[in-house]
Image: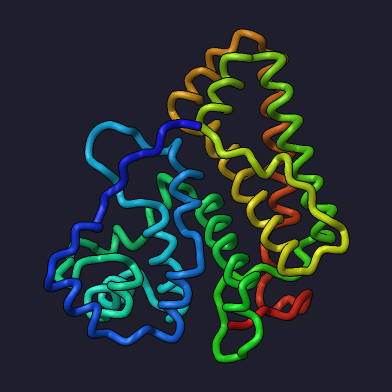
Amino acid sequence: MKPPVHYKSFDLTSFADLHVYSKLPPHSYWSQIEKKIDFTYADLLCAFLYSSHGQHPYAPSLKLKIRLVQVYYNLSDRLTEEKIFGDLFIKRFLGLPVEFFGFDHSTTALDHHRIGLALFHASHLYILAQMYSLGLWGERGKSWIVDSFACQPGMAMVGAHRLIQQAMLRMLQQLKRAYPALYHLAQQNLLLDALTVRMPAKAEIRDQLLIFSKQVTQAHALLKWFQTPDVAKSFAEWTNQPAQQKSLQLQAKLRQILAENSRPPAPDDGTSVPLEI
């Protein structure tokens, strides 16, 4: 894997921050999410999209936290900005100093251009799958989570997981045979541990969602990796035209499989019952 990118850090909070946050009682929802959910997975998954030089970017994990706040309260980007500025519970959840006012609504738009809508959305769904697996979403019926996974996306989840896994393996194996240098770059830059995970057919739905959604994030990251400037340049200079075309076909196939099997249905299409918080 590529060495971790240095993201903006807010760890050095002042005595005033510690004093204010220590006076706040635990929040019934956000304190549980902060303690139990791994947002930092996205920092490693998306590291290949950022340079280790220059100004430190906001971490993808922070953007996912902001996205969760936004969909929980059903806010626009601009209202999300105001919510962050004025709600101490949210500031504490995000790990921001009390007097932090550095975001604007373009920041809370979550860097979709860099990360890409598909990869960011898949990462958001992986966060929801973690919440569901821990019982933080799904049983209480108090409010709806936006963009929730269907319990049976497209095909049966076990079969869809195998389809995605096989499509990723075919892409990488073809790259290994025809363009070893690019293959080794992928090994260095990408998180691919989900390729070795098998999904038990009789696993509980919460465990299937967790395994499946993690696989989907890595599949989208693999497709996004081909679009990064350095990789796109190397790919364009590939002298083996038939192999290059084959790689493009395999990428298109993986993209089709993801589109058909990992997107939640529209809320009103009647194909599934939405999960609840």
- Residue 163: image quadrant is top right
Q: In the picture shown, does residue 125 fall above or below 222?
A: below
Q: Quadrant of the C terminus?
A: bottom right
Q: Residue furthest top?
A: 239
Q: Measured from the top left, where is residue 92 in percent x and y?
A: 30, 73
Of 102 and 207, the residue lying toward us: 207
Q: Measured from the top left, where is residue 250 in percent x and y?
A: 72, 31
Residue drawn at (41%, 44%) of the image: 114
Horizontal arrangement in the rendering, residue 35 relative to residue 141 (left or right): left
Horizontal arrangement in the rendering, residue 67 relative to residue 99 (left or right): right
Q: In the picture shown, does residue 53 fall above or below 197?
A: above
Of 139 and 79, the residue lying toward us: 139
How many marks the image carries: the answer is 0
- Residue 91: image quadrant is bottom left
Q: Measured from the top left, where is residue 29 in percent x and y?
A: 45, 82
Q: In the picture shown, does residue 225 fall above or below 99?
A: above
Q: Please, which colouring scheme is shown? A: rainbow
Horizontal arrangement in the rendering, residue 39 relative to residue 89 (left or right): right
Q: Measured from the top left, where is residue 175 in percent x and y?
A: 67, 21
Residue drawn at (83%, 56%) of the image: 200
Residue drawn at (55%, 35%) of the image: 190
Of 274 and 162, the residue lying toward us: 162
